[in-house]
Image (cartoon, rainbow, N blue to C red):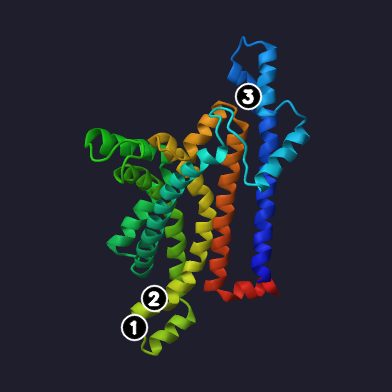
Amino acid sequence: MRYVLSRIGQAAIVVCVISVGAFFALRLTAGDPARIRGQVFTQESVLQSYREQFGTDKPIIVQLFNTIGGMFRGDFGTSFRYEVPVLDILLPALGNTLLLGGIALAISFVLATVLGTLSARYPTSLIARFSSLLAIVGQSAPLFWVSLLLISLFAMNLGWFPPGGLDSWKSLVLPVTALTLSILPSQMRVLISGVRKELGEDYVRSARAFGLSESKIGFVYVYRNAVLPLMTVIGVDMGTVLGGVIVAEMVFNYPGLGSVALNAMNARDYPLIQGVTIIAAVTFVLINLIVDLLYTVVNPRVRLGKAA
């Protein structure tokens, strides 16, 4: 229990630091949102009225405390551009982003498990060679290039799938494919390395000596130990997934956090940019927290070591 509370406390501190950092970064670098609303030749009195409306006329410390206080109340403010509560914009976009990223992560995990395990057990097989080629292509090809290639081939030339948007399940196929190819190589290589290492351990030879089947040895003992580094990689990959999702959303015109963030930055929409940053940070921290807790379930020695 102490370990869980400790990890939750660390996660809360990380989110707070990111929130404060985002607040000051926006104020120091993003410019005046009133001028974006008022254009070039707007009178200063009109610009001042916009600043009063946005709350940017107050001292920066007052703005910081107002922002933090609102966050604790679940109020992320009102969008400067759309003039609606920020959460009303972010929650649907977050759902779309999690849908895209979650499907890609689940598919990559399954593929990494199957291809990685078979490649480790049969290193000279056709599957091992295919996995190696897939890992090289996925790791060397930029996500935006793969996305454009998929659009050109399967949307423009063959017409099998729509080039963008979110109208049906078909709209998810191309962005999910592009994102899966970008995160699969690291997971697959970690699992291949882990399985090969575990297959050389003494307990595997002992299990074979006791007459246990290769399938039971592989999936009950070897895979359970080899999957531990993979769980860590998945937690780290969440940053890559969120970043990759944003890139894929922009290429495929997908209505997620990436599109919201781009429009918010162009409009100097402080509350919306802060909301995107905080929501992304909370999502990343929560998923890593869940991975850490699952790690202790699979390997209780981690929990005991932390508690000691």
Structural crowding at the residue carrying mark 2, measured as other residues with C-alpha within 10 Å and reported as few (<14), some (14–19) or many (≥20): some
State how far apart marks 1 and 2 are (Cα). Answer: 9 Å
Secondary structure found at label 2: helix
Secondary structure found at label 3: helix
Front tag of 1 and 3 = 3
Kindly check if marks 1 and 2 are in contact, taking CB atoms under 8 A apart as contact. Answer: no
State how far apart marks 1 and 3 are (Cα). Answer: 67 Å
Q: Position of residue 184 (x, y in %)?
A: 41, 54
Q: Position of residue 133 (x, y in %)?
A: 35, 52
Tell me which numbered mark, 1 or 3, is placed earlier along the sequence: 3
Question: Which residue is labeled 1 in the image?
Answer: 213
**In front of the other: 110 or 19:** 19
Above-or-below relation of 74 to 61: below
Structural crowding at the residue carrying mark 1, measured as other residues with C-alpha within 10 Å and reported as few (<14), some (14–19) or many (≥20): few
Q: Position of residue 129 (x, y in %)?
A: 32, 58
- Residue furthest to the bottom in view is 210
Above-or-below relation of 45 to 166: above
Q: Residue at position x 62%, y 72% from top?
A: 303
Identify which amino acid the numbered label 1 is placed on: Ser
Q: Residue at position x 69%, y 73% from top?
A: 307
Question: Which residue is labeled 2 in the image?
Answer: 218
Q: Quadrant of the N terminus?
A: bottom right
Identify which amino acid the numbered label 2 is placed on: Gly
Number of the label disc, if any, that sits on residue 33: 3
Structural crowding at the residue carrying mark 3, measured as other residues with C-alpha within 10 Å and reported as few (<14), some (14–19) or many (≥20): many
Front tag of 3 and 2 = 3
Identify which amino acid the numbered label 3 is placed on: Pro
State how far apart marks 3 and 2 are (Cα). Answer: 59 Å
Q: Residue at position x 37%, y 86% from top?
A: 212
**Residue 182 visible in image:** no
